Image (cartoon, helix red, strand yellow):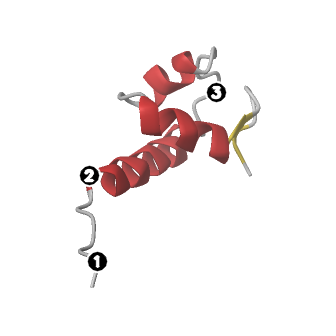
């Protein structure tokens, strides 16, 4: 799914860069070589970034 139509940024691309880079949507768009254009995608992008950040900070389950 495309998160940003203006820059053709896919959700998978944003999730991948969110795992290795820190920052807000504008910073991560920059890491992908783009800048926000119309801005309508930024709320959704921030939600995706927050999900990736939460999963990266989640404790690992103990193996039974």
* Above or below for 4 versus 36: below
Q: Which of 31 and 3 is in front in this view?
A: 31
Place residue 15 in its image quadrant.
top right
Q: Which mark is residue 27?
A: none
Is 28 on the left or on the right of 62, as rendered?
right
Earlier in the chain: of badge 2 and badge 1, it is 2
Residue that label 1 marks: 63
Are circles 2 and 1 on residues that touch, CB within 8 Å?
A: no
Place residue 22 in its image quadrant.
top left
- Disc number lying in front (2 or 3): 2
Is 12 on the left or on the right of 53, as rendered?
right
Q: Residue 38 carries which label?
A: 3
- Describe the element under mark 2 as helix, strand or loop: helix
The residue lying at 44 percent from left, 32 percent from top is 20
The residue lying at 41 percent from left, 54 percent from top is 51
Are circles 3 and 1 on residues that touch, CB within 8 Å?
A: no
Q: Which of 62 and 20 is in front in this view?
A: 62
Badge 3 crowding class, 10 Å Cα cut-off, few under 14, some 14 to 19, many 20 or more, is few
Q: Residue 61 in the image: state x and y as whole percent.
A: 27, 72
- Disc number lying in front (2 or 1): 1
Q: Residue 34 in the image: state x and y as whole percent.
A: 63, 17
The residue lying at 44 percent from left, 44 percent from top is 49
- Describe the element under mark 3 as helix, strand or loop: loop
Residue that label 2 marks: 57
* Above or below for 34 versus 56: above
């Amino acid at each position: 799914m495309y998160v940003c139509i203006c820059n053709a940024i896919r959700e998978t691309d944003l999730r991948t860069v969110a795992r290795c880079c820190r920052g807000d949507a504008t910073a991560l768009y920059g890491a992908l070589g783009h800048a926000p254009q119309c801005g309508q995608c930024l709320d959704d992008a921030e939600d995706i970034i927050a999900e990736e950040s939460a999963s990266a900070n989640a404790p690992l389950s103990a193996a039974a």
